[in-house]
Amino acid sequence: MVRQDDRETGEAVSEYDIEVVRPDLAGDEFGPEIGAGHEEGPAPMVAIVGRPNVGKSTLVNRILGRREAVVEDVPGVTRDRVAYDANWGGRRFTVVDTGGWLPDAVGLAAAIAEQARLAVELADAVVFVVDATVGATDVDEAVVEILRRSGKPVVLAANKVDDTAAEADAATLWGLGIGEPWPVSALHGRGSGDLLDAILDSLPEEAPPEDYGAESGLRRVALVGRPNVGKSSLLNKLAREQRAVVHDVAGTTRDPVDELIELGGKTWRFVDTAGIRRRHRENQGADFYATLRTRSALERSEVAVVLVDAGDPLAEQDLRIVSMVVEAGRGLVLAFNKWDLLDEERRHYLEREIDRQLHHVRWAPRVNVSAKTGRHVEKLVPALETALESWGSRVPTAKLNAFFAELVASHPHPVRSGKQPKVLFATQASVRPPRFVLFTSGFLEEGYRRFIERRLREEFGFAGSPIDITMKIREKRGKRRG
């Protein structure tokens, strides 16, 4: 996995004083890593709900600290729900803005209310927004009953409290019986800090770092793919019983369901994730949340099995899901379902599609299966074990640098503007996935980094695992600190 870098580092290919570099002395002579990333788990989800025109979208903008949600003084402007990344006090969370909630609505209003209900169902905490200047209405009290039944933590935001005199209006909302009303002015920002603190207090504790591969733990497998490719059927076949709902209607599975499955003499934790349809903005209703939950499932997995319907041409959704797995830094196994139904002509064209459209993941093990009959499902075990072994593989530093010395000598970087950047030293910074840091004398072009990745795989394997290559570019002598 080679990440795109800022082009401004291109000027780093200027004059350098090049010499052999020891990693323990490299510190100040090198700039920041180019293309470096860090591992983070899934952020908790906060749903913002309330009846129409109480200021939910304005409050979302206030929480984000920027104008993202559409705000108009007209009820029902927010028809769908939109998710935004937020941060307060160093804590990440996802804010989901919903349309106005009218429990007894019909038509379009009913669809909006249903999406708000789904947001509550899948959120970790709920912010219930009430217009303090109006007070609690019958609709607000009806929503409160639904929130109580959900069992989710609820933070009551008494909005439109623009001055001290209006705080008495907020106090009357104690009568809703769901805890302290937090007076806030979404428009002016008054009280927003206290409200955000209350939201963080309502969220579950941050998950501890994953102890991947611990002997006492189970290896975690995310089963992903576009809707109706047979994920639930495959899970049932692996479990040898009917556990997941199977239906011809695409998108039957809405939420990830963890299953402990005996396979190949060991127990695996499988996650049957909801099928991903299209981009977020095109998703409707529950499918929107299914996409968010699928991303969460990838974050808490170690390896993903991407199931593809071999009978259909590879779709944009298939390629996007594969990219999601690679970007998440998880091991990857490609499983082509309904293989037993293919004729020779379709197999020929499928091979061409794979060569053309999945060339960037040639390193992923392939398994041809039939979820319906169980054909070759046992071959998933060696594929998963290969991917997991590669995912946690480490190359000794001495062996790695011997490889790079030979590589640079036989295939140096092309000369650009009279300069030729070199790899001075390399180290593997981490595993799961393998991440390599190259100390260089200049900016390495993307094509050369791809070449490095290909040769790394040829030499050391890494079948089934993405690898991450980043650079630390040696600074010019004139720019050295101290």
Image: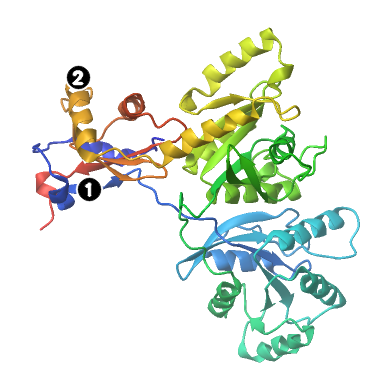
Question: Foreground residue, 306 or 238?
Answer: 238
Kindly identify the residue that appears in the image at 68 percent across and 88 percent down. 166
Left or right, residue 99 beside residue 415: right
Q: Position of residue 375 (x, y in %)?
A: 69, 25
The quarter of the image holding the N terminus is: top left
From the image, tell me which residue sits under label 1: 31
Sequence-wise first label, 1 or 2: 1
Kindly identify the residue that appears in the image at 73 percent across and 63 percent down. 120
From the image, tell me which residue sits under label 2: 410
The quarter of the image holding the C terminus is: bottom left
In the depicted structure, whether residue 167 falls above or below residue 56:
below
Question: Foreground residue, 315 or 186?
Answer: 315
In this rendering, does residue 379 appear at all?
A: yes
In this rendering, does residue 439 appear at all?
A: no
Q: Nearer the viewer, mark 1 or mark 2?
A: 2
Quarter assignment of residue 168: bottom right
Disc 2 secondary structure class: helix
